[in-house]
Amino acid sequence: MNVVGFPRRVSGLPCWSLSGFLRHRVKNAVPFIADFENALAREARQRGVNGVNCGHIHHAKMRTIGGILYCDGGDWTENCTAPVEHFDGQPEILQGGALNRFKRRATELATAS
């Protein structure tokens, strides 16, 4: 028995597909996310900066858009990710244990000077 379909049929409602609904939502979200990232890259270029760090969709990624670095650091609570900039200026997205190693190294370097 279909736990979603049966109650809908009994109630006289049309058939409803969860997978179809989710596919439609994702299909519409992808262009929106790309437009948002491109708009941020344009704004960064206009302001004369090299990149932008944003947590818009909570999915960690770094990519270059028209010569501008776009970084979504993800989120700490769900994916255990965080954006960092190393002392040499190199950006990176760390995940879980790597973040702890980065903190320890940063503390070592700060106390050594």
Image (tube, helix red, strand yellow):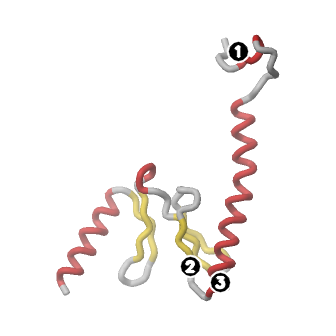
Mark toward the start of the polypeptide (2 vs 3): 3
Q: CA distance from mark 2 to mark 3?
A: 8 Å
The x, y position of residue 58, in whole percent, is 53, 56
Which residue reaches farthest front? 11
Q: Residue at coordinates 72% horizontally, 65% vertically from top-left?
A: 35
Residue with the mark numbered 1:
7
Q: Quadrant of the C terminus?
A: bottom left
The x, y position of residue 27, in whole percent, is 74, 48
Mark toward the start of the polypeptide (3 vs 1): 1
Tell me which corner region of the image, top left, top right, bottom left or bottom right, holds residue 106: bottom left
Q: Residues within 10 Å of mark 1 (few under 14, many from 20)?
A: few
Mark toward the start of the polypeptide (1 vs 2): 1
Q: Residue at coordinates 72% horizontally, 41% vertically from top-left?
A: 23
Q: Residue at coordinates 82% horizontally, 22% vertically from top-left?
A: 14
Compared across the picture, whether 52 is left or right of 1 comes to left
- Label disc, if present, on residue 51 of the rendered structure: 2
Q: Which amino acid does the dot numbered 2 rest on?
A: Gly
Q: Which amino acid does the dot numbered 1 rest on?
A: Pro
Task: State which mark lies toward you, 1 or 2.
Answer: 1
Q: Residues within 10 Å of mark 3 (few under 14, many from 20)?
A: some
Q: Which amino acid does the dot numbered 3 rest on?
A: Arg
Q: Residue at coordinates 18% horizontally, 80% vertically from top-left?
A: 111
Tell me which corner region of the image, top left, top right, bottom left or bottom right, holds residue 54: bottom right
The x, y position of residue 103, in whole percent, is 28, 68
Compared with 1, 63 (above or below) is below
Q: CA distance from mark 3 to mark 1?
A: 53 Å
Residue with the mark numbered 3:
45
The x, y position of residue 93, in whole percent, is 45, 66
